[in-house]
Image (spheres, rainbow, N blue to C red):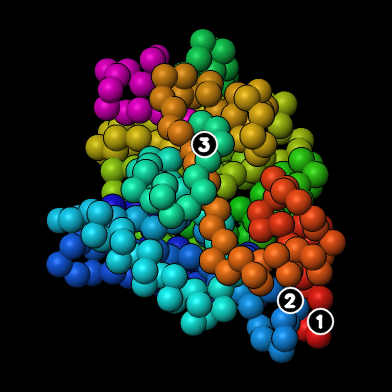
Amino acid sequence: MNKDIYFTEEYAEANEVIEDGRAIHFEIDDENGHLTLNTILREIGIRIDGEKYYDLISPYGYGGPVIHKADDPAALIRTFEEQFTKYCEKNNIVSEFVRFNPLFQNQAPFEDIYDVAYIKDTVGTDLKRFEDPFQSEFSSTARKITRRLLRDGEFTCTLTRGFSDVDSFIDIYTETMMRNHASDFYYFDRSYFYGLKNMFDEELITITVSHEGIPVAMCLYFSSGDIIHEHLKGTRDAYLKHSTCYLMKYEMVKWAEAHGYSLIHYGGGVTNADDDPLLEFKKRFGKNTAFKFHIGKKIWNRRVYDRLCLLNGVQGETEFFPAYRMNDGFRKKEAV
């Protein structure tokens, strides 16, 4: 059974606040198998002929439909398409955008339903394939910087189960987003972080790098089965030059290896470019371990989709999906 945290109802619920929507759970459980979909329902901020319409998006991270058991996969997928089509018709759902989970490749069974596209790789540190993951997965540069930091002993690195120091994390994370000129989306409301703590505290791990007792860098991880997901992280501006993130990566590798985990997953970059700087940086800690990341697009109501595009002045094909949300289309407009 695929029990990754990104597939759970609770994770979708935790993301309601940042996607400005409502988590929905759809499930097929019959003689052909078991399938679930947890996603976010967002209202489209304009009415068509007096009707409200909605679209779907995966929670921050990964999602999409996932098969947990399949005695007859083809029949199970047919049932999903038939029933979910009816669900979307009944609930005025126009389109769906999916970020499939690269660790489970859950796009594969659904390529006849969704318009699936490979985007880029994500990377991780494999803890089982190599006798010494630090030596085999970290680049020579990463090993050199890590050893220097360990030798100098200027910083302390502490790993704790749970998410106790939420406020310090929020401050450091926000400072990092400001330094990186991140889009508004990434300035998550404080309730998002406390929601993660309340829903997942036992499955959260925090690493804190401190200087003279003051936190200067922090990273938040999900523990999910035998996988560790690096979720969010940040470093104080004044300490960026010290490369303290290398200490956090090293600390997590040693801890996860000692506790029987098989993989630490770092995710990908912030763009689709092959030379995305963030992805290239993450490869320093997973030079031999990569996963293919796919997205999926689906128009469930073509008539309304096209009309929404026209109302937002969008004509022809566009990379942005759904196209009617280009330039924040219909996000805050009053219904008419």
Q: Could you tell me which secondary element the residue under label 2 belongs to?
A: strand
Residue in view at x 53 percent, y 40 percent: 117
- Look at the image and tell me in which quarter the C terminus lies: bottom right
Q: Which of the labelled discs sits on residue 45, or is there none?
A: 2
Report the residue marked by disc 3.
118
User: Would you say 311 lies left or right of 16 here?
Assistant: right
Q: Nearer the viewer, residue 128 or 194?
A: 128
Q: Could you tell me which secondary element the residue under label 1 belongs to?
A: loop
Image x and y of residue 262, in percent: 29, 35
Whether residues under marks 2 and 1 lie with C-beta atoms below 8 angstroms apart, the answer is yes
Q: Is residue 132 magenta?
A: yes
Amino acid identity at mark 1:
Glu
Report the residue marked by disc 1.
334
Q: CA distance from mark 1 to mark 3?
A: 36 Å
The residue stretch that appears in magenta: 122-137
- Look at the image and tell me in which quarter the N terminus lies: bottom left
Q: Quadrant of residue 203?
A: bottom left
Q: CA distance from mark 2 to mark 1?
A: 6 Å
